[in-house]
Structure formats: C-alpha cells, structure tokens
C-alpha cells in the first residue's frame, strides 16, 4: 500500500492522477498546509523540503523497509518504474519524457505558481512582478502549444507522466486569465485528457477542502508565503 501525503493543489494532483491511472492502491494522509502540518517533524522526515506531496511505499519492489519519496518529478518516475507504465522503455522516448517532465517541474509549475501568487494572493498588486510572470506564463504556454502542434501528447505520441505533470497546472488557466483560444493545440490536448476517467478521479481528490482565499488569514499567509503582516 502507498501512503500519499498531500493537499488539494496542482502539485498534489499530479500524484493522485498517476496513482489512479496505474490503479495502485493508496491511502491519503492529508497535510493541512494552511495550519502548518508541513512543518511537523513526522512530515519533514519524509519530505525535508516541507512541501507536498510525498509518498511512502510500504511494499517496494524487492521487499525491505518502506521507501519515502518527495518531489513530484521523483515520485512520478518512481511510480512509473514501479508500475511499468507511462514511461517509455526505448532511449528516445524515455529521453523525451524526462525532458518535458523536468521542463514542467523547473518551469511551467514554478512560473505559473508565481504568476498566480502575484495575481491572486499577494496583499498588494505590484505591476512589475505581475507583468513579468504573466509574460513568462504566456511564453511557456507558447512552448507547450508548439510542442503539441507536432505531437498529440506532451512528450510524443503516447500519454505519459509528462502529461500528468502538466495538466493540473494548465487547468488553472481560468483563474490565471489565460485564453486557451490563443493556444489551440494546448486546448485540444486539455480536452482530450479531460476525457480520461482516471485523470478526473485524481483531480477530484480533496477539491472540497480547497481554501480559495488563503490571503484572508494572516496565519495562513505566514505559513504559506512566509509573510508576516506589518504592524498597523
């Protein structure tokens, strides 16, 4: 059995999608990041970067002690190797998945995260970072759109962990005020993936728990963003 330590965020949904797609049994261990669960010693023991998600595989290949994994890219690769699914075995196909997976974890996710923060959550609307990250978000959508013009899926002709990594971030397009009509290949890919029942199940995990306005609480702002309110 796999224990999934998570919260309802795009990064958390990457892993719940993969677990659903692979039909791997898992138990959810909710991490209330608005209350500081991510800083508790028991969570830091498996995720030293105090970020969700993380997993513990209590039945690793070859037996032995449970294996803990943190960071979404590492988790997706681990689960792909464990299940033998969604990661090509040929060198060229595997290389492409690695490239686009690392593109997502190093670019698409962080940049959309910063764009969302300054647009939706920052206590002050500051034009420079808002515009800076908006432009970078559009640039990355353009990169993805050009790739999907050549291939039906992010890393080529088959659905892989690269798609699972990208989808939860792209699904924030409405909140981030991105017009998918400007990126028709992304739009087509997005609609294709939404038809997958396992992906939809993964995306539904914890949706009712979402705090849509973490900026409304000074305690939550401090825990999530490291920002303390200035004295009046």
Image: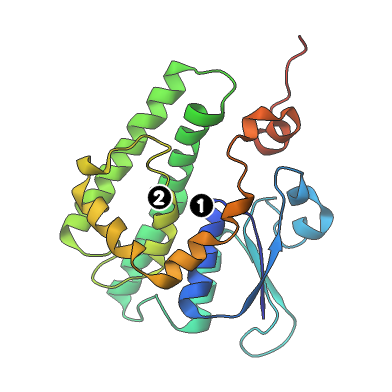
Q: Nearer the viewer, residue 5 or 49?
A: 5
Categorize mark 1 by other alpha carbons within 10 Å: few (<14), some (14-19), many (20+).
many
The answer, for residue 141, to whether it is visible in the render is yes
Q: SS for tag 1?
A: helix
Residue 137 lies in quadrant: top left
Mark 2, residue position? 171
- Tell me if residue 93 comes above or below residue 172 in the rendering: below
Categorize mark 2 by other alpha carbons within 10 Å: few (<14), some (14-19), many (20+).
some
Q: Earlier in the sequence, mark 1 or mark 2?
A: 1
Kindly identify the residue that appears in the image at 77 percent across and 50 percent down.
37
Q: SS for tag 2?
A: loop
Residue 16: image x %, image y %?
54, 66
Residue 148 lies in quadrant: bottom left
Q: Nearer the viewer, residue 24 or 96?
A: 24
Mark 1, residue position? 10
Q: Residues at badges 1 and 2 in contact (C-beta under 8 Å)? A: yes
Q: Which mark is residue 90?
A: none
Residue 55: image x %, image y %?
65, 68
Q: Which quarter of the rendering shows the N terminus?
A: bottom right
Kindly identify the residue that appears in the image at 78 percent across and 12 percent down.
231
Task: Please give the count of numbered marks on the rendered protein.
Answer: 2
Residue 192: image x %, image y %?
28, 63
Kindly identify the residue that appears in the image at 19 percent across and 49 percent down.
184
């Amino acid at each position: 059995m796999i224990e999934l330590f998570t919260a309802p965020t795009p990064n958390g949904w990457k892993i719940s999608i993969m677990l659903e797609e692979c039909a791997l049994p898992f138990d959810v261990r909710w991490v209330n990041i608005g209350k500081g669960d991510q800083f508790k010693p028991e969570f830091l023991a498996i995720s030293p970067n105090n970020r969700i998600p993380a997993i513990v595989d209590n039945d690793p290949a070859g037996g032995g002690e449970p294996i803990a994994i943190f960071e979404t890219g590492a988790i997706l690769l681990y689960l792909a190797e464990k299940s033998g699914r969604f990661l090509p075995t040929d060198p060229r196909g595997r290389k492409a998945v690695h490239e686009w997976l690392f593109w997502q974890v190093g670019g698409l996710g962080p940049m959309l995260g910063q764009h969302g923060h300054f647009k939706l959550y920052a206590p002050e609307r500051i034009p420079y970072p808002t515009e800076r990250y908006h432009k970078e978000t559009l640039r990355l959508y353009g990169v993805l759109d050009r790739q999907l013009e050549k291939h039906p899926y992010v890393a080529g002709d088959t659905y892989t962990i690269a798609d699972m990594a990208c989808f939860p971030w792209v699904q924030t397009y409405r909140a981030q005020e991105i017009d998918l009509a400007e990126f028709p290949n992304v739009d087509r890919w997005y609609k294709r993936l939404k038809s997958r029942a396992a992906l939809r199940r993964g995306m539904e995990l914890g949706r009712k728990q979402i705090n849509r306005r973490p900026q409304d609480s000074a305690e939550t702002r401090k825990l999530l963003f490291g920002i303390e309110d200035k004295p009046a």
